[in-house]
Image: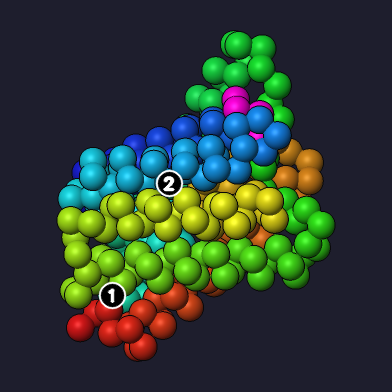
Amino acid sequence: MLKKAIAEFIGTFVLVLFGTGVAVIGGGIEGIGTLGIAMAFGLSIVAMAYSIGTISGCHINPAVSIAMFINKRMNAMELSYYLLAQILGGLLGTATLVTILRSAKTPLDNLGQNSFGTLGLSGAFLVEFILTFVFVLVIVAVTGKKGSSSLAGLVIGFTLVLIHLLGIPLTGTSVNPARSIAPALFAGGEAISQLWVFIVAPIFGGIVAAVVGKFILNTEK
């Protein structure tokens, strides 16, 4: 279990450091652009999937782990270890990024990059719910008994790229509470007050995806 937790910790650390790092250092949408940020998150997933996937399954996302728990691919004890490791990995990834940025005297703009934008609360919640639903549904499908394990990492990574291409201009794209919590804590202000949406909506989206995958797509048979 410790090995799996360490793998999840490392995976989430890498995802947050490189994904959020590219967004901040690259100057956000006005700088490196939506595609650049989307590719950073997607490629981070691909890299980790083929590095730690055989150890922990490379969830590196509480919404994914909760979905796997619902579909009985892991027990409650495993889930608790995964969630703790993911949150701590995200915290260290953000702390490392902030340290690097401050050393380089680089502004922390775009650090707390998730927000309602012009959507309002209900619109942001709906966007995050739908994006996470699609992301987790793909994951439970390609990692299920009928999926192709050799291609799973690529499929999941490029699905995350696609999701970010749509979501970045709208909410900044979370679909992952672990990658939203730490940046919001460091950014403070509005990022903190809106954080609950980027925790609750992805979890709900993941739960619905798990149920749809199990009972409609028969991913567990």
In the image, is 170 to the left or to the right of 73?
right
Residue at screen point 44% across, 75% down? 209
Q: Is residue 78 magenta?
A: no
Q: What is the crowding at mark 2: few (fewer than 14 residues within 10 Å), some, or many (at least 20)?
A: many
Q: Which residues are magenta?
A: 24-28
Q: Position of residue 203 (x, y in %)?
A: 52, 66
Q: CA separation, marks 2 and 1?
A: 26 Å
Residue at the image position 24 percent from the left and 79 percent from the top = 220
Mark linked to residue 42: 2
Mark 2: which secondary structure? helix
Q: Which residue type carries mark 1? A: Lys
Whether residue 90 can be seen here: no
Q: Which quarter of the figure has residue 12?
A: top left
Mark 2: amino acid: Gly
Location of residue 161 in the rendering, given as x and y in whole percent from the top left corner: 47, 51
Question: Residue 72, labelled with which disc?
Answer: 1
Given residues 210 and 50, the one toward you in this image is: 50
